[in-house]
Amino acid sequence: MWGLGVLIPLLGVGALQVSQDPGEVQVTAGDEVALGCHVLVAEPWDLLRLEWVKDTGHRVLCATRLRHAAPATPAHCVPRLRMAWHPPRATLSLRQARGDDAGCYFCRVTLEI
């Protein structure tokens, strides 16, 4: 068994807030795990870039650009990962966890103008 940790960033001065749950997950090989990212934007927005990143080298695992008034486009993810967007929450799902999946995962959100 190994741990998948999650960093919990809180960004902006009220304009953009990002929180993650769960804070830490213990996973056994072969398990499926889901990590959540809650995104709150205080002001109207047109475009958000949402990425899931792993601590090792800060490699982007999944990425998508979200338009406020349009359906979500499919995220580009590495194999065994998928991302779902159900405003205001993004979920990263990992299928069939392996030992090299251990580490800290975090959700990075950029408000594009």
Image: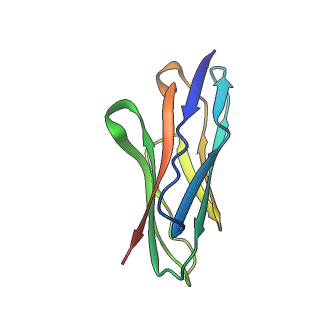
On screen, residue 1 versus residue 78, left or right, reads right
Residue 68 in the image, given as x and y percentages of width and height: 54, 80
**Image point (51%, 64%), residue name:** 74
Of all residues shown, which one is farthest toward the left? 57
**Image point (55%, 71%), residue name:** 72
Q: Nearer the viewer, residue 94 or 39?
A: 39
Of all residues shown, which one is farthest toward the front? 13
Q: Nearer the viewer, residue 45 or 96?
A: 45
Q: Does 70 appear above or below 60?
A: below
Residue 20 in the image, given as x and y percentages of width and height: 61, 47
Residue 3 in the image, given as x and y percentages of width and height: 59, 22
Quadrant in the picture for the N terminus = top right
Q: Does 35 appear above or below 112?
A: above
Which quadrant holds residue 51? bottom left
Quadrant in the picture for the C terminus = bottom left
Q: Does 85 appear above or below 96?
A: below
Residue 109 in the image, given as x and y percentages of width and height: 46, 59
**Image point (57%, 28%), residue name:** 4
